[in-house]
Image (tube, rainbow, N blue to C red):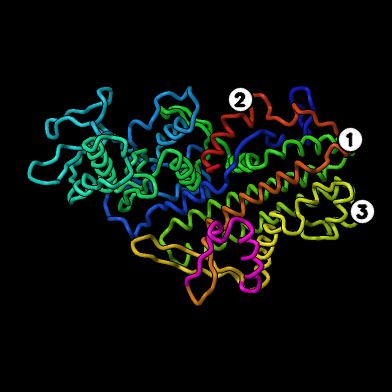
Amino acid sequence: MLLMVAGQIAWCWPIGAMIEIVCHPANLTRIVCGMRFNSSSDRRRRPGFAWPDDASDDARELFEPRPPLRKLVVQVDHEILVDDSSSWSKEALLSGLLTHPYVQVVRYADGGPPPSAARITSPWSGEHAPGWAVLHQRHEDGEVRGFTTGDEQSVSEHAIYGNSALIARNDRNHPAYGSLAPDEALKRREADVLGARVAEEISADLYITRRDYLSGEAKYRAKNVLLCTPGEALPLLGLYLRRQGVFIYFRGVDGKFQYRCSRRLYFFTGALELLPSMWRWSTAFGQYAIAANDDTLPALSSSLVQRVERALQSRDELFTALNMHGNRDSTDDALRSLDTALIFLMGALDASARAVHRVLGISVTPRNAGWQSRNWLDRVAISAPKLAAIFDEGSEAQHLLEILRKFRNSVHGEALSPLTVKEGSDPERILVSLPREDLQAILNSMDALGGRDAWGVESHWDNRMHAEPGALLGETLERVVAVLNRIMQETPVESLPDVHVTPAQCTPPNDPSGRYSDMKREGIRWQLGF
């Protein structure tokens, strides 16, 4: 199917953009796996958790599910939120997403709500600010601090007990606020901990803050609350909304307007953001398909994107399983999602080899096309030596392919097995075994690609080697998309008959309201953690 766009004929999927972006696919991996949500078994039971009222805004179908997750409870420092959507930024997107009805937000500030915040006065409870947690003064006879929360219908009184504020005041060796006078640093440390204690008492899932004492390697360890910066919160919030079936790339900070899309378009756009070189391929293959009346190359390029897209969906499923309390079902979900994602990433590399095979006109059957085949690479090197050199012996791409192939081949032999690890007060972690038959080859390649720590490799039992699934997938995804982009950049698509790719065709369509507008691509990319 062909489309006429701006007077030019293009193939039916005007794919991606050849733009200079910095993609970090592992960012969400490090956030979600290094800063996990708290499992239900670790949280205090309280009746305040709420569930979304509605399934969706669409007409009800028999098999349309209700939202599977309860509302996300978020405490956020008021100064982080922005009140103007016209200035597009991560903070504006975060502020808009926090207005979604599936999210329950409690605002907080050291000095309480600003004068502009709405107030409700009741003869029974006095004045309160709906949607706010308001801290009271410390009792003169101790460390007890009260605070108030409420909405339009009710008010709740809470109390903070213990000596956490005292400990923070006396923590003079902590690097936070080291440039301030001692008395001012003391007050800031205490204020920071009190904010975290409020989040603990209201059983918040997230506390979004930039407070120095609550961040960094020596950060305060909150009980049952995930402390995160705005940059860390955005992909976590995006993951939660996607698991609720919500796929939006913009929502106004007042919550009155949003842009939504299908799940397929959401992940398809996310995959294209990882593959900016695909725009050049798509343009060239579309031109060739028209001239030769052969749609094989466009089909292969679309298949490549589709496999990365499905790997991203499997990544979401993996993160969901890793953030659940460890049991047989969640462990099985994690291993299945990891297997699926790795197979799709290997499939993307295979599809790229088939496409290169046709572009170069290699005479042997396409079944022999594969970056792991030295005979086939020798044929590639005849007309595209730089392309073949990507997979030279000892190269990063060759080591990556070795790891990915060995994991894929495990489906033919001993299945990957799980191991649950519990260390101190940290949440349980799920690890996955490395294939024993190919263990040394995998470890050697990991050592050549940043070291075993980067791949999440650990040894805990009987000297067997295991890896943290999120770190393993994150490192693999990051390196696979980098190799795919190099392959597309070095493929001489201009050698195809009747193909003439101009620089203008290697950039996104200049249409702010178009399918791949800057706002849409950025909103989706940020939520995916890139």
The residue under the point 43% across, 23% down is: 84
Sequence-earlier tag: 1 or 3: 1
Between 523 and 459, the residue placed more toward the observer is: 459
Residue assigned mark 3: 363
Is residue 454 on the magenta stretch?
Answer: yes
Which residues are drawn in magenta?
436-460
Contact? badges 1 and 3 (CB < 8 Å): no
- Crowding at dot 2, Cα within 10 Å, few <14 / some 14-19 / many 20+, comes out as few
Sequence-earlier tag: 2 or 1: 1
Residue assigned mark 1: 291
- Give the CA distance from mark 1 to mark 3: 21 Å
Residue 134 against residue 415 in the figure, above or below: above
Q: Position of residue 316 (x, y in %)?
A: 53, 51
Q: Position of residue 435 (x, y in %)?
A: 61, 70
Residue 62 in view here: no
The residue under the point 72% across, 53% down is: 349
Location of the C terminus by quadrant is top right
- Crowding at dot 1, Cα within 10 Å, few <14 / some 14-19 / many 20+, comes out as few
**Is disc 2 placed on a helix, strand or loop?**
loop
Location of the N terminus by quadrant is top right
Along the horizontal axis of the image, is 188 left or right of 95? Answer: left
Between 340 and 200, the residue placed more toward the observer is: 200
Is residue 1 on the magenta stretch?
Answer: no
**Is disc 1 placed on a helix, strand or loop?**
helix
Along the horizontal axis of the image, is 111 left or right of 27? Answer: left
- Crowding at dot 3, Cα within 10 Å, few <14 / some 14-19 / many 20+, comes out as few
Between 387 and 493, the residue placed more toward the observer is: 387
Kind of residue at badge 2: Ser
Kind of residue at badge 1: Ala
Residue assigned mark 2: 513
Along the horizontal axis of the image, is 252 left or right of 22? Answer: left
